Image (spheres, grey):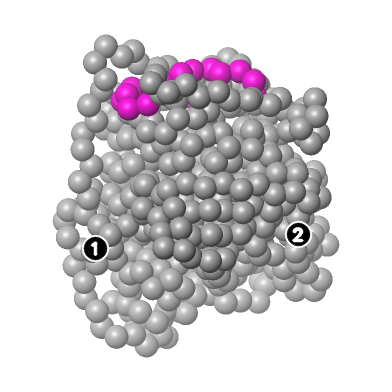
Amino acid sequence: MVYTDYFFDEPVFDLHDGGYIPLEKTDLPEKPLSIPKLLKPDKIEGNDVYYTITAQEGETQILPGKKTKTWGFSAPLLGKTVVFKQGVHYHIHLVNELPEVTTFHWHGLNVTGPIVDGGPHAPVYPGGSRDIDFTLDQPAQTDWLHPHPCPNTARQVWNGLAAAVIVTDPEEAKLPFPRNYGVDDIPIVLQDRNYHDNQLDYKTDYDMDGTLGKYAVINGTINGVFNVTTQRLRLRILNGSNRREWRLHFDDDHEFTQIASDGGTLPEPVELTKLMITTAERDEVIVDFGDKKPGDVVTLMSDDVPILKFKVGNYTRNDVKLPSHLNTIPKPVVTPGSKIVHTVMSGMDDQVRLDGKLFDMQRIDRKQKIGDTILWDVTNTNDMDKGMIHPFHLHGCQFLVLSRNGKDVYPNEHGWKDVVGVNAGETVRIAVKFTKFGIYMYHCHILEHEDTGMMAQIEAYDPDHEHKFHLISMEEMMNGGKS
C-alpha cells in the first residue's frame, strides 16, 4: 500500500498559525547541495576512538555577496557528520570557541545524563572544554548534535549549530540499504532562515511560538542541487528547524520508501508519496530513480515550494527489492503494578507549560527506575481549531508509540522514537524504558518553547547503586558556574 497523506491533523498544521511565515520560492542561482564532511578521529587505540568537536564561529557563502557569519561544530556552519559504531568506546573532547556558554547535546544517543547527554547541566564556557566518554550500545540510527543551554538553545541553533550523527551496527549493515556516504547515503538537514544584509538577526526574527524564516536552507544551501549517480538514494532527513513542520513530496508525486525513524530501522518498509516531519524528528527514506533517465530532474517540495532538486545522471541499473521484514521490535511488556504517567503540554506563546509548570533546573519532576517499562500518556491540551502541534521529546531513551487518542498510530510510527508530534486535543500513549542512570530533560522540541520553560526533568535511577547529581541553577550555568 502507498500512503498519500501527511497523517497529522490538517487544522493544526503550522501554516494556519497567525504568525506563520511561508517559504518563498527564490530566483537565486542554483548551487550544489553541500554535503557535510565526516569528522575524523584524533586517534584509534583498539576499541577506543578519540574525537575532538569544537563549537566555533565561521563565515559561509549562503547568499550572493558578503558571507554570512555562522556557527558550527568543527565547521563554519552546521557541523561535520559524526559516525559512531555500536560497541565502540568513544572519548570526546568538547571545545567551546564561541563568545558564550554552550552545551553539546547528543540528541538520540542512549548515554548517561545529565553530563554526557549534554543538557543544560553540562555547560562548556567560552575558551573552555569538557571531556566525556561512553560505550555506544544502541542500534543503527540517525541522530544529531545540537546545543542545549536553556534559555539560548533556539538562538544557537538558528546561528548554525546542528550536526548529523550516524550510528551503525552489524545487523543493519546486512540490509540492502545504500550506505556510501555522500554518494547514495545523504544527510538532509532541513532548516529555514531569514537574512538581513546577508546576516542572521535572531532578535529581529524571533517568535515565541517558534522562529520561522522564508528561505528553505538545506544543509546550509539555498536552491541546492544534488547530482544523482546511482539508481537508489538514501536520504537521512533531519528536521533541524526551530519550529517549522516540513511537508515533503516530489513534484511528480514520485513514490519513496521510509526505512527508519528516530531510533532506527522500522519493522517493515513504508511506501509513501508524502511525509510530514515535525521538529527534531528523523526519517530515513530510499528514493529509487529507476524510472528516470539521464537529464531528468525531480524536485523535492515542502507544501508548494521547491526546496531541493535531484538531477539524474548516468547510473548503473540496480533493481533491489527490500525485504518485507526489516527489523524485529519486541512488543513492550509493561512493568506489573506500575502506574501510567500523565504529562500535559499546554498553552501557546508565553503561556506554554509542561504539567502546568515552568522549567526549573534544580527540580526533579519525575523518577523512573532503570529497566522498568512504563506507559506515558502525553497530552496536548491546545484547542483543536486554533491550537498547534507540540513535538514531545524525551532524552536518554527511545520509546515506542502505542496509540493516538486510543486509536492506531501512523503507519510510519511503528519503530523506535524519541520525538513524537502530538496534535492539538490529542493524547499519545508511549512505552518508556530507561537503561542508563541520569537526570534527563523532557520537553516540547519547538526550540522557543523549551527556552521559554516548556521543559521538565526526570531521574532514571538504579535502586542498587545511588548516584548523586549536582543540579546547577540557570544563573550558575549562565555565569560560569558562579551563583
Task: Determine the secondary structure under disc 1.
Answer: loop
- Picture coordinates of residue 313, whole percent (x, y): 41, 85
The answer to whether residue 377 is magenta is: yes
- Picture coordinates of residue 206, whole percent (x, y): 74, 41
Quarter of the rendering containing residue 258: bottom left
Q: Main secondary structure of the magenta part?
A: strand
Task: Determine the secondary structure under disc 2.
Answer: strand
Which numbered tag is attached to residue 175?
A: 1
Q: Nearer the viewer, residue 267 or 66?
A: 267
Type of amino acid under label 1: Leu
Say if 119 sits above or below 317 in the image: above
Q: Range of the magenta residues?
A: 361-380
354 lies left or right of 172? right
Which residue sits at x=17%, y=53%?
Answer: 325
Quarter of the rendering containing residue 428: top left
Point out the tag, 1 or 2, that comes first from the N-terminus. Answer: 2
Res 363 seen here = yes
Q: Nearer the viewer, residue 167 or 272?
A: 167
- Picture coordinates of residue 308, whole percent (x, y): 52, 67
Which residue sits at x=83%, y=62%?
Answer: 197
Categorize mark 2 by other alpha carbons within 10 Å: few (<14), some (14-19), many (20+): many
9 lies left or right of 118? left
Say if 173 sits above or below 332 in the image: below
| Residue that numbered label 2 is attached to | 57
